[in-house]
Image (cartoon, helix red, strand yellow):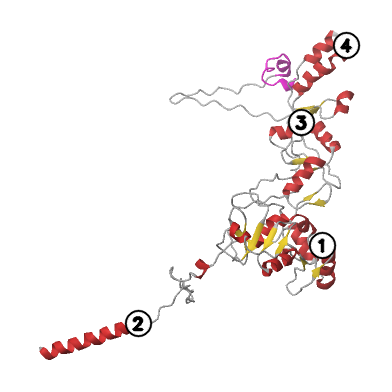
Amino acid sequence: PEPAAAATTTRNAENSGKSGAHDQRPQRKGKRTQHAKPHQHGTTPNDNTGNADDDEAVCFICADSVTFYAVGQCDHRTCFRCNLRLRELFKSKACPYCKSELDTIVYTRDSEAEFADVLQRQLPFEDQELGIKFDCKEAYDATKHALQFNCPHRKCNYVATDGWKDLKAHVRAEHALQFCDLCLQNKKSFAHEHKLFTKAQLRSHYARGDGTGFTGHPDCEFCRRSFYDNDQLFDHCRKKHEQCFICVRGGTGRQVYYANYQTLEEHFNSDHFSCRHPACLEKKFVVFENEIDLQSHDLAEHGQSIVGQRARREAKHVNVNFRYAQPGASSSRAARPTTMTVNEPDAAGVSIAGRRRPTGFGRVTNDTPSRRAAPRATPAEGTSTPEPSSPEPEPEAETLRSGRYLTCFPTLL
């Protein structure tokens, strides 16, 4: 047992010596960044790997990595591109996080220094118009480059000196491409962020969009004019075209517009009850939903022109003959449409402008509706109805004229 104990003691000493040598390795100072290891195809990386992005600062607006920080008096940070877009394109100096108005802001590489401490440093560059100060030349050059009229073509470094006119001429001459004018006027993007199109691509862009949620620029069928989105088209239709207030009130014409008052007046005469008195025609929009309201208006406004008691009694008589719309009625259409349906700016998602009104919608005719057969009474359970020994004879014409069936079928007279 003594040799065995001695051997065991020797092995333990050797192991302790190795452990001591291992503990004496120099330790690396500073924070250690973990790098993601490439995983094999068909496998999922472990949650403990791939944390390289944890130490990389990203902008809470665009989620891109931050090269230069934009910090204001509230000490909330964004990337300089998002802040520059807000101040230059949207004309807003409010902090996107707390909505505080920031007259002065600093672009810096420092990710932790407060605004008051950064102001104490030497800031050699400044843009007084935008209220931006820079603590390094690199931030100033990046901002200046974003504000220039740079050619969007990826292989071109041309910078226009005469604004959009010069840049559009360069794109047509050098690349045989063109911009979308509506996007240039309304889209909040820098010059190098806009898209270039061929003629065929531009037509598809206007009609169907680009497949990223944008469905195209809607157009007004009356004016043959395109608009950036449905908000602009809706505002244009409310200002330049007419709408039937009766249909809107009834919930059937909220999105239907007419080219002018002449086409709207034709709709009034065919679908509603308009006053034909010259004074009311001059006033316009003297229209009623039913004939009873029109008769009441005639008695109240034009009753003094009715002469004689009999004429007054007839004017107070209410006609109970109803008129119904014929589903298949069709109307003649001019070269340009007289009605247009425009989706209101909802934002349910995709809005389609320019949809026409259905054929015969709301059309009123003088056709008499067909009578429906009265429902046959169902006998109670356990009872039997005796069948007549002979069929009941048809009523004669004299019986009809005598008034026997007047209450059932008044139109037969």
Q: Earlier in the sequence, mark 3 or mark 4?
A: 4
| Residue receiving disc 4 | 307
Nearer to us: label 2 or label 4: 2
Disc 2, disc 4: CB below 8 Å? no
The disc placed on residue 253 is: none
What's the CA distance linking mark 2 and mark 4? Answer: 123 Å
Is 398 contained in the magenta span?
yes
Which amino acid is tagged 2?
Gln
Nearer to us: label 2 or label 1: 2
Nearer to us: label 1 or label 3: 1
Which amino acid is tagged 3?
Asp
Q: Earlier in the sequence, mark 1 or mark 3?
A: 1
Q: Which element is circle 2 on?
A: loop
Q: Is residue 37 above or below residue 353?
A: below
Camera-nearest residue between 248 and 81: 81
| Residue receiving disc 2 | 24
Camera-nearest residue between 332 and 158: 158
Disc 1, disc 3: CB below 8 Å? no
Q: Quadrant of residue 9?
A: bottom left
| Residue receiving disc 3 | 367
The disc placed on residue 164 is: 1
Residue found at the far bottom of this picture:
3
Q: Earlier in the sequence, mark 2 or mark 1?
A: 2
Q: Residues within 10 Å of mark 3 (few under 14, many from 20)?
A: few
Q: Is residue 359 above or below residue 10?
A: above
Disc 4, disc 1: CB below 8 Å? no
